[in-house]
Amino acid sequence: MLSRREFLMSTVAAGGVAMAGLPIGAASAQEQIQIFVPAAPGGGWDQTARTIDQVLRSEKLISGAQITNVGGAGGTVGLPQFISQWNGKGNSLMVAGMVMVGAIIANKSANNLSEVTPIARLTGEFEALVVPASSPFQTAGDFVAALKADPTKVPVAGGSAGGSDHILFGLIAKTVGVEATKLSYVPFAGGGEALAALLGNQVAAGISGYGEFSEQVKAGALRLLAISADKRQEGIDAPTMKEAGIDVELFNWRGVFAPPAVSDADKAAMITLIETMAKSEAWATECKNRNWTQILLTGDDYAKFLAEDTARIEGILKDLGLA
């Protein structure tokens, strides 16, 4: 079995080729990694972690992964543990994303993502704006008109306060000239609760990842008004928000981070490993099956994006009175 040093040397060699001439998979298949998920099992981050493990093993890039879940408060319970207890562990990754950025700001967390090591932004999931089938809103334009008339009478269900659903609602309001602090946003801990509120006509509309609503949309129980993607999506009969006259585009992105204080060699090895995985047919298939859009960005480019997105989200949450 290759030593840790030999593994790292092989994965950062030019072109990702091992010093002995073996492809990256042959060199790194001896390596087991650890994946930290600052959320409970079953959610989007957990699904991402388990898909990463599955694809890396199927491509023979690792021998396996140990996945640790620590849930709570949009990832801000687990983040301090990752920073302090996983410090310097070069074979480790944390899965996180846009929701954690918002939670850090909204919860005024003592720790933030500048303290960890950005490895790769992997996927984006667009959001959907839906209403009950009985709603008078036939189009996104109808929804916006009601919002402008009296935002307090248009309660919208979504995930946790400060999360991607809430952020999208704030962006919609800002774009159409509605004061964000007047919005009626109803946060729920899980998608099932938000769906029940919609189906029970307890709220006027809902915002979440399309996958949360897709079955009820197909069944005719919910009407899909618009999606926040950059272009129309195959198999989804709905305009983008921009097409519907709302100049907003948003992907709930997810990515991976290494702990603080990892060596340059460890960071480079992890970037190479994730880039190789992201180029595989197995990863492409999983993304397609899960309605994940591939938006790969690695290393310093990812760090720059993270800083810019954090500033953008902080501005939105200030408008919403949450920062």
Image: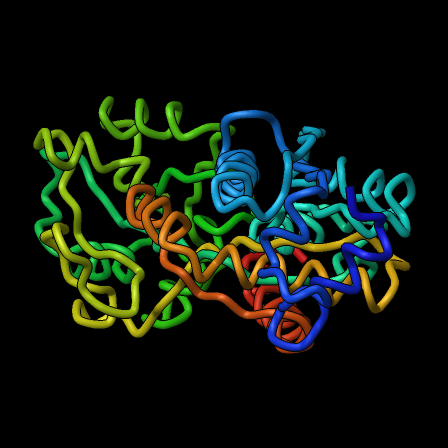
Instruction: Point out residue 281 in the picture as x, y percentages from the top left corner.
Output: 36, 54
Q: Residue at x 32, y 48 (%)?
A: 285
Q: Is residue 5 left or right of residue 227?
A: right
In this rendering, is residue 138 above or below 216?
A: below
Q: Foreground residue, 137 or 105?
A: 105
In this rendering, is residue 183 above or below 316?
A: above
Instruction: Point out residue 10 in the picture as x, y percentages from the top left corner.
Output: 73, 63
Instruction: Locate the C terminus by quadrant.
Output: bottom right
How many numbered marks are there? Answer: 0
Q: Residue at x 44, y 37 (%)?
A: 186
Residue 322 visible to an observer of this rendering: no
Q: Is residue 158 left or right of residue 122?
A: left
Residue 13 visible to an observer of this rendering: yes
Q: Residue at x 63, y 53 (%)?
A: 256
Instruction: Point out residue 120 in the picture as x, y percentages from the top left corner.
Output: 60, 62
In this rendering, is residue 29 above or below 145?
A: above
